[in-house]
């Protein structure tokens, strides 16, 4: 997510609550330990405290016992602040762990003072800067490692989901780079295939492929089947967008790839076949190619899959957040008004969607709640085991069942 040049990023974590604020100051990153504190979480610049009276500016007011307790709790929170001096505006962030994503994503971890960390478990935050540098910070030891090779803004960062601490970076310098943080942050390989800015990247859940999107309608799927990153090569280019493509994400079972573009659409693909399955339009009637490829004031800025793979959310320049059902493209199942939206992310249980905005705030929206059919739940489980569509033929399934597992119902 990009921030204005003179802003800094403040991350305040409180039991799945996130507040981002900006200030005209030196760029910094604040990482807070988890602790009980008032939900207002207002930070006061107190210049003088005497007895029961707080004095700041020209205002004097008496503190009641509740305010005293809030002040004490906030002072305790301040003791747990970890500050990372970034020196440059922060454009992207990613958390990575040395345990597979599926093993630590849904468990209840005690974060206070980061006491859950041990010698066998690393928790890393990667920070992409405007200068092209990537700063990685070990949350437990506060050790900072600077990764230097990109020549322009780091637009996106993704850690591998298998706990190997492999970091993928996408930059405006037209390249993607793969870094191994278990090998002192050495750069493994540079992936070249984009002719212009690279906006976003994503790992497939089974690490068999990765995707990248960028300017000039570019969507590339990279082959990683043998897990040899140095031999990673372009598997196919997907054509169908009419404008810059700015976001991409694999479905939780790895069977689908969604791409969001300034052409007002989200396209759903089978990345294993290169087949376009469905289009989700944000303007009705759909724009012609000429208008979709120009300045249409309805750019789709970001999208995110729900953890159960049945819905996804989109952020659009028309000031709306839309929740789409994977099985119904006619209309969104829910719409919310959020001005200046830039990015979005689901909570681990899929009940809450967090949306970051241009003015430095984060909106929390209740995601649509729906009991999934047994069919979809079984498909999700099977495709997690057999994510490659080409491998379904080996199961010798009836045509109807095979078609359902291939998501042919979407096309």
Image: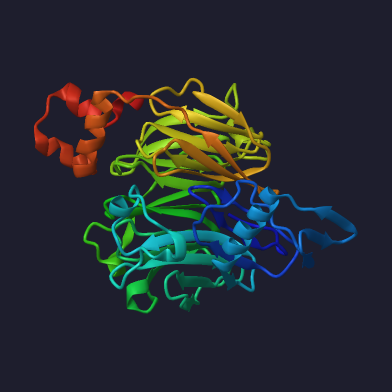
- Residue in the image at 37% along x and 72% along y: 181
- Is residue 202 depicted above or below 30 in this figure? above
Left or right: residue 40 versus residue 134 is right
Give the residue furthest to the right. 58
Quadrant placement of the N terminus:
bottom right
On screen, residue 77 above or below 341: below
In this rendering, does residue 156 appear at all?
no
Closest to the observer, 367 or 52 = 52
Whole-percent x and y of residue 369?
A: 42, 27
> Residue 48 in the image: x percent, y percent?
79, 67
Closer to the camera, 241 or 331? 331
Q: Quadrant of residue 287?
A: top right
Residue located 51% across and 72% down the image: 135
Q: Residue at x 49, y 47 (%)?
A: 16
Quarter of image, res 72: bottom right
Quadrant of the rendering where the C terminus is positioned: top left
Q: Is residue 24 left or right of residue 80?
A: right
Q: 401 and 89: which one is in front? A: 89
- Tell me if residue 1 can be seen: yes
**Quarter assignment of residue 231:** bottom left
Indicate the colouring scheme.
Answer: rainbow
């Amino acid at each position: 997510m990009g921030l204005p040049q003179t802003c800094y990023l403040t991350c305040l974590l409180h039991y799945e609550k996130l507040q981002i604020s900006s200030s005209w100051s030196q760029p910094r990153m604040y990482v807070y330990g988890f602790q009980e504190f008032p939900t207002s979480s207002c930070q006061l610049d107190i210049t003088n405290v005497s007895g029961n009276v707080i004095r700041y500016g020209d205002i004097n007011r008496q503190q009641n016992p509740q305010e005293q307790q809030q002040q004490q709790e906030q002072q305790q929170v301040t003791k747990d602040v970890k500050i990372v001096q970034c020196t440059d505006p922060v454009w992207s962030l990613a958390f990575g762990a040395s345990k597979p994503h599926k093993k630590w994503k849904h468990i209840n971890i005690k974060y206070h003072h980061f006491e859950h960390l041990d010698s066998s478990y690393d928790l890393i935050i990667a920070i992409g800067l405007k200068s092209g540098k990537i700063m990685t910070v070990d949350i437990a030891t506060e050790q900072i490692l600077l990764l230097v090779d990109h020549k322009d803004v780091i637009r996106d960062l993704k850690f591998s989901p298998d706990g190997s601490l492999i970091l993928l970076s996408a930059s405006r310098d037209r390249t993607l780079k793969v870094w191994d943080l278990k090998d002192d942050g050495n750069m493994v390989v540079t992936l070249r295939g984009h002719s212009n800015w690279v906006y976003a990247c994503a790992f497939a859940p089974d690490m068999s492929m990765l995707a990248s999107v960028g300017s000039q309608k570019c969507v590339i799927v990279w082959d990683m089947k043998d897990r040899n990153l140095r031999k990673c090569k372009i598997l196919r280019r997907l054509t169908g967008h009419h404008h810059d493509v700015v976001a991409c994400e694999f479905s939780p079972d790895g069977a689908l790839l969604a791409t969001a573009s300034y052409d007002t659409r989200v396209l759903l693909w089978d990345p294993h076949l290169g087949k376009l399955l469905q289009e989700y339009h944000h303007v009705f009637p759909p724009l012609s190619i000429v208008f979709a490829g120009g300045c249409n004031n309805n750019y789709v800025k970001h999208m995110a899959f729900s953890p159960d793979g049945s819905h996804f959310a989109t952020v659009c320049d028309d000031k709306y957040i839309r929740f789409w059902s994977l099985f119904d493209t006619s209309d969104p199942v829910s719409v919310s008004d959020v001005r200046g939206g830039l990015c979005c992310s689901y909570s681990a249980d899929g009940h809450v969607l967090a949306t970051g905005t241009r003015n430095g705030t984060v909106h929390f929206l209740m995601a649509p709640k729906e009991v999934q059919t047994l069919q979809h739940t079984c498909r999700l489980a099977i495709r997690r085991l057999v994510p490659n569509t080409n491998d379904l033929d080996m199961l010798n399934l009836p045509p109807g069942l095979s078609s359902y597992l291939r998501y042919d119902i979407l096309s």
